Structure formats: structure tokens, C-alpha cells
Amino acid sequence: MNELEEARNCWSKAKQTKSPVLSESTVHSLVTSRAKREQKVIIEYIVASGVWQLIVYAFMTHFVIRFWGDWSILGWCLGGILLYIPFTFVFLKKFKGMCSGTLNKPVIHDQAILHYVKNQFRLLSEFFQFKKGFDFVGVPVSCFIILIIIFKLYMPHPIETYIVGASITYLLILVIFILAILHENKKRFHKPLHHLEAMIKEMEQDMSV
């Protein structure tokens, strides 16, 4: 039996007792196990995304310094930095809210539990919507910056000289990024959101009985 099914069973048993509050052990069975699993997914994403953003900033800053005065590449690198700044700001704001929400009272009303789960769902859903919008713009731009830098570093002539090869290389980089993002979204967002939504529906149905 997975954790979600176990949590649902605990909720149903608690409702059958018709108790206005849930005991600490029931709360932990219902929410903590589920929350810990979702929190683990969130923390894994925070670490991976945080490292990636640091790499991007370091990468762009390095080439800004290296190619200072060469606006054929300098402008793209500065643009990449400016593009990631709002993403980093929202990233820190949203996940600070998600990681700060806890259930630590000894006795918690069922409405408080439902509110907690809904809040986790809302925060994750809001950030996912923002991330999809950012990826729609950020991924093609990031891939193009990578392409420009590769040709600047390793090819003797301007990128315009290799228009066919550059186009093929760009498409390959873009496909790799898209596949990685689709896998990430499924693991870090689609599944946790589905699990949280299922918990909310189950709780609301039981509370309406």
C-alpha cells in the first residue's frame, strides 16, 4: 500500500469516529508521511535548480569578463543573466513558502489539515505555471547563447558562416533541453500535484458526509 492510500485510510477511520479533532498519531499518519514525501521531491528540485542557476550565473559572468567589449556575445550573456534574475527571485519566494508550512501542533482540526494541503498544492501549482512560462522563453534563449559561445570558442569564422551546421546543433541542444525539462516536470510537478489534488478531493468528500 502506498503512502497516499494509507493516508486516505487514516482519514476515513478518523471521520468514522466522528471526532471533531484528530489525534497527533492520526495527523502524522494522514499528513506527515505524505508531506515528507512531497517535501523530499521539492528539496531535490531546489538543490538541482539552485545548482543549475549558480552554474548559469557563473557561466555567463565568466564570458562577460572574457569577452568584454565584444558585443556580439557580451549582449547575449548579459541578457541571459537578466533573464534568470526574475526566475531566481520567484524560485526563492515560492519555495520558501512551501518549506515553511508545517503541522506541528499536538491536536489539529481537520479543516486545518485540509487548509495545509490546499496551500501546498496552490504554491506548487503557482510556481509550476510560472516555470512553464519561463521555460517557454528561457530555454530557446539559453540554447542560443550556448550555441553562440560554442562557435565563438571553437570555430575560426563567425557563426553565420556555418548556418546549416549551427541550425542542426541548435536543434539538437534544444531537443536535449526539452526532453530533460519534460522529465523534470513529470517527476517534480505533475506527480506531486496529482497526489495533493487527490488528497484534497478525498478529504472534501469525507468532510461533506
Image (cartoon, rainbow, N blue to C red):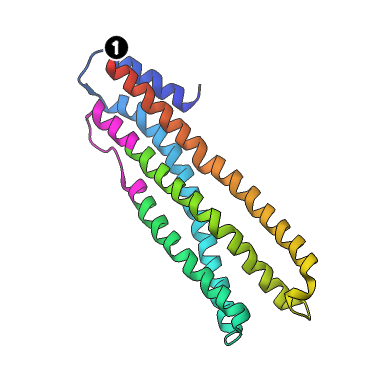
Position of the C terminus by quadrant: top left
Rendered view: 27 above or below 186: above
- Residue in view at x 42 percent, y 42 percent: 125
Q: Is residue 79 left or right of residue 97?
A: right
The amino acid type found where label 1 is placed reads: Gln
Residue 74 in percent (x, y) is at 57, 79
Q: Is residue 167 left or right of residue 54?
A: right
Picture coordinates of residue 96, whole percent (x, y): 35, 52
Quarter of image, res 124:
top left
**Residue behind mark 1:** 16
Query: What segment is highlighted magenta in the picture?
Result: 97-118
Image height of 205 relative to 82, above or below: above
Task: Tell me residue 175's x, y (percent).
Answer: 69, 52
Q: Residue at x 52, y 60 (%)?
A: 51
Q: Is residue 117 magenta?
A: yes
| Quarter residue 145 falls in | bottom right
Q: Is 127 or 34 nearer to us in this picture?
A: 127
| Residue 156 percent location from the top left of the image | 79, 81
